[in-house]
Image (spheres, rainbow, N blue to C red):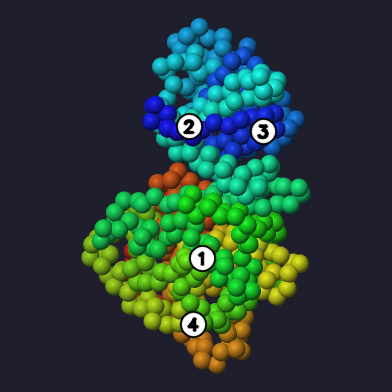
Amino acid sequence: MFPTTSGGFSFTAALEDEQATRRLMADIAATIEPGDLITLSGDLGAGKTTFARALIRHFAGDERVEVPSPTFTIMQTYELPRFNLLHADLYRLSGPSELAELGFEDAAENAVTLLEWPDRAAGHLPPNRLDLTLTLSPQQSETFRNAQVTGYGTFAAKAERIDAIRRFLARAGFAQAERKHMQGDASSRAYERLTVKGATYILMNSPRRPDGPIVRDGKPYSAIAHLAEDVTPFIAMTLGLRELGFSSPAIFASDREHGLLLIEDFGTDVVIAGDPPGPIEARYEAAVDVLAALHRNNVSDLLPVEKDVDYRLPKYDLEALLIEVELLLDWYLPKLDVKISDNKRDVYLSLWRDALMPTIEGPQTWVMRDYHSPNLMWLPERKGTGRVGLLDFQDAVMGSPAYDVASLLQDARIDVPEMVEISLLSRYTRARLSTDPEFNAPDFAKAYATLAVQRASKILGIFARLEKRDGKPQYLRHLPRVWGYLQRALAHPALAPLQSWYKLHVPPLKALK
């Protein structure tokens, strides 16, 4: 591997047969997003169309898809499950000027583009692209190819990532694995299901979080809110949970430097069902029991990661909790065309300081922070609390046990009926009282309501931000549900001052445009 002269990044691969070519295709496919341009270079018969055909069928999820060579049609468009794909072959073009006549740029907009014979468009290619050059090596064998993958511009990082993952899988003995994309979440992490000899594993691809803009006291939002910068917290929490007997995924291989983990596959059995989906109550009861069992433990904030490496969980302090509730002011209210004056903001934050202090001064435990249906798997072959598989806890902190209970029972992505919420909250309370005579149920109920409001306020802001800043409008469909949870929790008598502020300054959701 070596930097290219144009400031990109390049690596080479020896492809001994078509299977090796398909594996390289899967490596590249894992990084592709709508709008990407992949150019395919090389002599006639080097395998460019074979590579393109394999890639298109990979994204289609169907090896039977007809993929003719576009040598004569020049362009062929495919409507695939994740995006549209344009396959173009410029071999018959006499020069770059003919591209405009074909309407190439319009056809390629927001689609993935595979472009064979890119030299025919010399001087007209965008600066950001991934190039695969295939060359024959007859002295090796008829099927042997040498491949060079080069990322230009912003694609240099993609090429480097592809190379890092290839090396990681080779070291772990998974170079031959079949790879399949898995639907991810709102984060920058990506997941793939790997299959080797009939057994499945999960590849967690979690590059180090880049620092965002400075927002306060010389720190970015992620630092103030204590969001994980790399996979170290995930490893620490996985080991800690497993030590206590909970079902967090086993880790088979790790590369902390590059943010790569090969972990246990918990399958596809979840804790919800129906259309629209709702809680499977027996499974939600088991999930509540997991929290009650975890919260009985006197856990440490210092967790081992590997030999001579420990990780200390940050405290879910006032600064972190407050910057999260400010998301309501900074993103959600602007979505409603509501402007908040500095004075009103000061009152809002003052009310929140008063409400949050009892949760900070009360009992503290591991808070997984995203303990809800997308991150809980059902493992019926296990017993007791082990039946609930736990995922997505890399942003864990030391905080109030009420937070994760609220996260589960006011799930932002599915409707949890109020009577089900009350029943499960009572189940948790009874479980805690049965083993801890000092457990204070009224204080817990107050903390639960407070943190439910805090979490709902944060999520309203996050979902509005995902639509406005990140171009992900699909999260807006969850706003009515979260708004309903917010009203439920604000009804707690201890939150009357906050409820008054929200009634005055946060319009009903029906005003959303």
State the mark number for residue 10.
2
Which of the 4 quarters of the picture holds residue 80?
top right
Q: Viewed as shown, does residue 179 lie left or right of 336?
A: right
Residue at left offset 36%, top offset 60%: 223
Q: Amino acid at mark 4?
A: Phe
Question: Which numbered disc, 2 or 4, marks the residue that appears first in the sequence?
Answer: 2
x then y, percent, for residue 146: 59, 25
Q: Amino acid at mark 2?
A: Ser
Residue at left offset 76%, top offset 47%: 197
Q: Secondary structure at mark 2?
A: strand
Question: Which numbered disc, 3 or 1, marks the residue that appears first in the sequence?
Answer: 3
Quick check: marks 4 and 3 in contact, CB under 8 Å? no
State the mark number for residue 201.
none
Question: Which numbered disc, 4 or 3, marks the residue that appears first in the sequence?
Answer: 3
Query: Which of labels 3 and 1 is toward the front?
Result: 1
Which of the 4 quarters of the picture holds residue 16?
top right
x then y, percent, for residue 380: 74, 67
x then y, percent, for residue 158: 48, 38
Residue at left offset 76%, top offset 67%: 381
> Real-space Cα distance between discs 3 and 1?
36 Å
Between 45 and 442, the one lying in front of the other is 45
Q: Secondary structure at mark 4?
A: helix
Number of marks present in the image shown: 4
Task: Give the labeled residue for mark 1.
Answer: 307
Task: Give the labeled residue for mark 4.
Answer: 444
Query: Which of labels 2 and 4 is toward the front?
Result: 2
Residue at left offset 33%, top offset 78%: 354
Task: Give the labeled residue for mark 3.
Answer: 20
Q: Amino acid at mark 1?
A: Lys
Q: Residues within 10 Å of mark 2 (few under 14, many from 20)?
A: many
Q: Does residue 38 appear in this view?
A: no
